Image (cartoon, grey):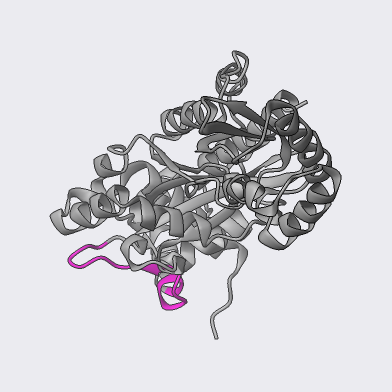
Amino acid sequence: MLKMTERKKKVLKAIINEYVMTADPIGSRTLARRYEFGVGSATIRNEMADLEEMGYLEKPHKSAGRIPSDKGYRFYVDILMELQKLSKQEQKAIKENYESKAPEVHEIIEQTSDMLSELTQYTSLILSPHLKDSVFRSLKLVPIDTKHVLLIIITDIGVQDRVVSMPEGLNHSELQQITRYLNERLQGLTLSQINEELLNELESTLVNRLDGLENRQLDVLYQGLINPGISKAKVYLGGTTNILEQPEFNDIHKVKTVLQVLEREELLYNILGNISDDTSNVKVTIGQENDFDEIKNCSMVTATYQLNNRSIGKIGILGPTRMDYSNVVSVVQLVAQVLSNMLTEQNK
């Protein structure tokens, strides 16, 4: 049984480094000329043959050279990769992106998406926070006319508002009392925790507190709280054409497949949502490791971003398996960290 020796590791690492730069199959002569292995090209060729037999390399049709397999990339990412230290200019660009704080979370996410694609030259995907997982801060009831009231729900990551029917027979003073009571009782809960059972319990208390108040008068307001019209988290894309400029996607079938992926927000939502919320590491998913057939020719590098140490969304890079993993992992790691710090600071 063949073993992964130190020389084989060096050969594999060199092949991946060369292939990422050139997109051309790598031969033993190229390696012997550019790297100091201390052996001739014939020995390197034997090592490459062993690596192919072990499943770390593949030989493209009609080519004398080898290219890394998904297994080869996985070994590289897990064992051989040294994270590329970002230049001072790149670090400065990332931090400066957040110095002029955008007023809305969705604007911050959009800026981040554009920056990620620019720094990596691949396609960026960012899953925005889902409002149902946000923490309730307060609500406001603003009368619009005699029949309608604007229900404003303020959370730690955004504001949701909708017009609901004015509860029949309620005056301005009673609306204020209801608002104060709900703000007191709902503080600190996520919107998904504000359910019908909880509101029925609060409703009974309010009916007892306010003379003449009836359950039916609160039903409209409570429906606005339970079903506040919260849409699904949005996926923001940046650099959508970047991935198509990679040589791997000269094939028209691959181009169509990738375009179909990028045009289907529901699929992108499922792809990002399917990745674990592990907050400790950047996650790299390579080729066939992807659960979705449409991106089995691609790799994804993702990380969660947080608000007050609570995961609220994901950032990711989509590119070919021939990805500059060292650089991309470094960028994604730093951006997730800076974005999390900025959102937490802005939320104070």
Looking at the rendering, in which quadrant would you find the C terminus?
top right
Total tally of numbered discs in the picture: 0
Q: Is residue 60 magenta?
A: yes
Residue 87, given in percent of the width and then of the height, sits at: 58, 24
Give left or right: position of 68 versus 79: left
Q: In this orientation, does residue 85 appear? A: yes
User: Viewer-proximal residue, 238 or 4?
Assistant: 238
| Residue at 72% over, 51% down | 280
> The magenta stretch spans which residues?
50-64
User: Viewer-proximal residue, 150 or 186?
Assistant: 150
Residue 105, given in percent of the width and then of the height, sits at: 57, 30
Outermost residue on the bottom side: it is 1
Outermost residue on the top side: it is 100
| Residue at 31% over, 48% down | 262
Give left or right: position of 119 versus 60: right
| Residue at 78% over, 45% down | 186
User: Viewer-proximal residue, 265 or 43?
Assistant: 265
Residue 278, given in percent of the width and then of the height, sits at: 67, 56
Q: In this orientation, does residue 321 appear? A: no
Q: Is residue 279 magenta?
A: no
Give left or right: position of 256 versus 171: left
Magenta stretch, main secondary structure, is loop
